[in-house]
Amino acid sequence: MFSTLFNQMLYQPIFNLFVGLYNILPGHDVGVVIIIITILVRLLVYPLTSKSIKAQKSIQDLQPKIDAIKKEYASDQQKQAMMLMAAYKENKVNPFASCLPLLIQLPILIALYMVMRDSLMADKFATELYSFVSNPGKLNPISFGFLDMAATKNYALAILAGLAQFWQAKGMLAKQPPKNMGPGAKDENMMAMMNKQMLYFMPLMTVLIGVSLPAGLTLYWLFSTLLTVAQQSYLLKKSSSNTTDTPDKNNVIEGQVVNK
């Protein structure tokens, strides 16, 4: 049941879109097809990705309070959970929102992997193509004149994907708190250390996984990450601009601004 649903809802539409684009594009370049599909997927999940980025930023801003609650109620897990949920609700933060786009993209990524694998097998065209999509017979995996999209161990693309992942993670990295700020900076320092570990771990995993995948899938991941970086930069810049333009009422007394 699940496999049939997956085939009809994801695999076949992506397979036919892949072959259809390949048929109509000048030069029949698989790499260009992958880039176009990446853009379409990013547009599809744009609203969810926006919520994810905002949720990550909100959780990061709330982290000192979260750590304080965990420390205060370390011996009472039930009370700790209640206080954490209250803090999330009070600050309108959904701790699960940051994971949703990745969970949605995972089936798409699996379907795209299967499409790239099967698009090089001529027998699949007869069984999976819609009637209105012409059969090209066979797809040429060579893209941009030199890249084999079907080959694995493309270290250049894998490293570029890892660097893009590093760039994305760095954009969300919590800044180290200033020194001599007293015990209040301890929680922020811990969060910064955790983020720093993720800053290097995720890019490394991206490189290792990217090397083992077909180059076409690594190209998809690279371009998808770059588009996410652009979206992330735009949203964070917009959020920072809104924060700057909106005065903090807690710091205004009788028309005077009091610095924290």
Image (cartoon, rainbow, N blue to C red):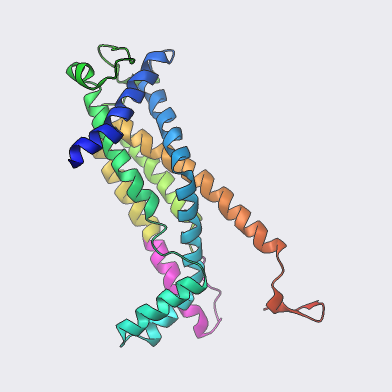
- Is residue 251 visible from the viewing direction of this image? yes
Left or right of 107? Residue 185 is right
Is residue 63 shown to the viewer in this render? no
Above or below: residue 257 compared with residue 3? below
Q: Main secondary structure of the magenta part?
A: helix
Asked whether, in this view, residue 243 is left or right of residue 32, the answer is right
Where is the N terminus found, in terms of image quarters? top left
Toward the front, the furthest residue is 1
Does the magenta run of residues contain 44?
Answer: no
Q: Quadrant of residue 117?
A: top left
Residues rendered magenta in the picture: 175-197
State whether residue 66 is above or below residue 93.
below
**Which of the 4 image quadrants contains residue 27?**
top left
Looking at the image, residue 56 lies above or below residue 125: below
Percent x, y for residue 60? Answer: 48, 66
Is residue 189 located in the magenta-colored stretch of the structure? Answer: yes
Instruction: Return the x and y of residue 129 as percentages of the image width and height.
Output: 27, 19
Residue 242 percent coordinates (x, y): 66, 59
> For the point 45% across and 49% down, which residue is it?
48
- Residue at image x 36%, y 86%? 73
The residue located at (32%, 12%) in the rendering is 134
Number of numbered discs on residues = 0
Q: Which quadrant does the C terminus fall into?
A: bottom right
Q: Position of residue 7 (x, y in %)?
A: 23, 33
Q: Residue furthest right?
A: 255
Q: At 30% across and 31% down in the image, what residue appears? A: 215
Position of residue 238 relative to residue 74, above or below, is: above
